[in-house]
Amino acid sequence: MFKFIGVLISLVCAAGAYALDGAQILEKVDRNLAPASYELYRKLINIEPSGAKKEYVLFTVKKGQDMVAGVFLSPASEKGRSTLRLGDNMWLYIPNVGKPVRITSLQSVIGGVFNNADILQLDYSDEYDVVGVEELEKEYVLGLKAKTKTVAYDRLKMWVDREKIVPTRIECKTEADMLIKTLYFKDTQDFGGGFVRPAVIETDSPLYRGYKSVMVFAKLKARELADEVFTLTYMPNIESLR
Amino acid sequence: MLITRAGTLNWPTKTRRNNERSPRALCAIGVLLLFAALMMPPMAGAADEYSFDTSETDKKPYSFGGYAEAKPMLFDLDRDAALYKTRFYDRHVSNPLSEYDFTLQLDAGIEWNIFKAFARINNSLDRTYDGWSDDSKPYELFLAAKPTPSLTASAGKLTAKWGKGYAWNPVAFLDRPKDPDDPALNLEGYYMAGFDYIRSLEGPLKTFSLSPFLLPVDYGLNHDFGESGHLNYAAKAYFLLWDTDIDLMFLTGNSRPDRVGFDFSRNITTNLEIHGESAWIDDLQRMKVDSNGRVSESEIDAWSGLLGLRYLTSIDTTYILEYYHNGSGYSEPEAKDYYSFVDQAYDAYVNTGNAGPIQKAANLTQGGYGRPNPMQDYLYFRVSQKEPFDLLYFTPAITTILNLDDRSFSLSPELLYTGITNLELRLKGTVLIGDNFSEYGEKPNDARLELRVRYYF
């Protein structure tokens, strides 16, 4: 009897430790990818099957768990467009239109494979629970489930480099396990301030056969920002933060 | 007069040189040739596709940009329509009628410390049946100071852009009326001074901001806003409360009747947004004409409201649906009286040569009957499909504006392509359908086709 209870207790402890490890790995992934509050420049590149490309440069700031804002610096047709995310709320401000309109996480303000949730991304651990961890020789494989229905992808399968604790690949899936897109993390670089992370995220999708989108990161650094920066009224002024 | 939207009138206040080919026309042709040249080089060919030269992100204290646009248009005129008669009663114009609009919008800004200066100058050159005309005016021209992220003070020519509606904004108390046929066009502002004060908070009320404005109508400023010799006060308070955007606003000050309003917007689900607006106007002067041409004026308290939604499907189809009640608009019998008067006035002109009544009708058209959507109840419905058949940057759409009072409507299919960097191509057609004495049945044209080529720089 005592033997059985002992086995049961060790199983429960092992399961608890296992779950804790997954959550800890995910939090470590988040902190290795970026500080909790930061500023960042990104180039987004949409590549068509013909090889034709369209490029966008985006300045982004993030604070805490649920506040992200960004403004497009180029091309000229997109310059001044800004986006804001407060938790599940997202807005787009277009200078010509002159007022923010609500948008959804599944839309894409720029077209291509990246959508708004990719561009205004929060920490993975804020949006997902770890529901499975698999240990491979060089990688962990985390199974992630969205905490709420409002998250763009219901399930993620994340391959994490065991040594650097950064993602190498993420499959984004629907609740019915249909693959929406795959993100490939490449070209690990030292951004300074202790941040060594992939500088390139490549994306392809079975929904956009032959198309590819790429996100290139630069000038990532920790930054303290006022909460008022992440408001609708401030959206026309986001570029002044640069 | 110009035809600048589906069948509505826009009487020119611009300088004109009738039947004289402007040298600026050559510039416009040059701009078109530039578009053609820009379209020639292929996009491919960059070898290092993932390069990111961080000098691209270096910030300069000044900025310069804008766009150049060419818009040829073709109208199928309706010679029996009331608004055709008020416009063309004393002249013969060919059918179909072609027009060419060229626009050069220049944006320039400079930042220094907490200060910013910005100018947006709109230059237009138009070729209509009436000849060439040109115009140049600042749409925005202001100085701003931002001592903290919580406070921005601005003075100069500003656009407030209040309201959540897509096609109409009854609460846009400080803005010029939007063209529901092209609601994303930027608009000329008014000279005013004001500030934005922002507070972020914990709890269900996440954001509060206050934006008060002073708007003078005097000393040559804002003469088209309303009665001269007054300083007008307006303010908007914004709340992000329980994940809902809520605005409360008012305008007072004697240049226009006092008015108050509110709007809201909220995401019900990740792909469904609802929004609404409501505005009350006290003691609004309203002019109408009976079928015999007798003009009367009355004072009313008008309520206008809008309720709308935007829905995105899993295949990137966007639906926008809005219902609009225009409290200051004309009822169906009132509109019929006006159309009936136009018919009588035109017949009198044809039979006797007396232009007085038809000129009076033309003036009434300017006074309100000819504005976009002059009646009371409308429905706006737009369906757009982003990138169908995996065609990146290609968005077809179809829009209808339905007059619920007389059941006439416009139907506008369009194709938008943005695949070439900084170049936007839009081909749009519009057909207007309605009985005699209905709004869209009495517009000056039955159909319109336009190509808009816009290059951003």
Image (cartoon, grey):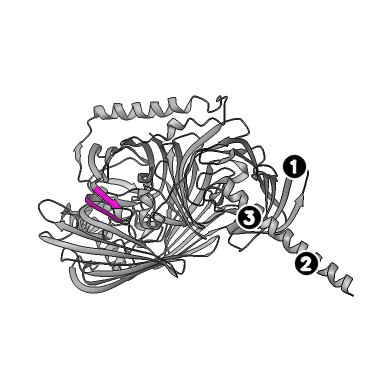
Q: CA distance from mark 3 to mark 1?
A: 26 Å
Q: Residues within 10 Å of mark 3 (few under 14, many from 20)?
A: many
The residue that mark 2 highlights is A12
The image quadrant of residue A152 is bottom right
Q: Amino acid at mark 3?
A: Tyr
The residue that mark 3 highlights is A153
Q: Chain of mark 3?
A: A
Q: Amino acid at mark 2?
A: Val
Residue B437, position as x, y percentages in the image: 35, 62
Give the SS element for disc 1.
Answer: loop
Q: Which mark is residue B426?
A: none
Give the SS element for disc 3.
Answer: loop
Q: CA distance from mark 1 to mark 2?
A: 27 Å
Q: Chain of mark 2?
A: A
> Does B145 lie within the magenta span?
yes
In primary-sequence order, the first of circles 3 and 1 is 1
Q: Nearer the viewer, mark 2 or mark 3?
A: 2
Give the SS element for disc 2.
Answer: helix
- Residue A73 lies, with reference to residue B301, above or below; the image says above
Question: What residue range appears in magenta?
Answer: B144-155
Viewer-proximal residue among B33 and B146: B146
Residue B195, position as x, y percentages in the image: 25, 57
Viewer-proximal residue among B432 and A6: A6
The residue that mark 1 highlights is A138
- Number of marks drawn: 3
Q: Are marks 1 and 2 on the same chain?
A: yes
B113 sits to left or right of A33: left
Q: CA distance from mark 2 to mark 3?
A: 30 Å
Q: Amino acid at mark 1?
A: Lys
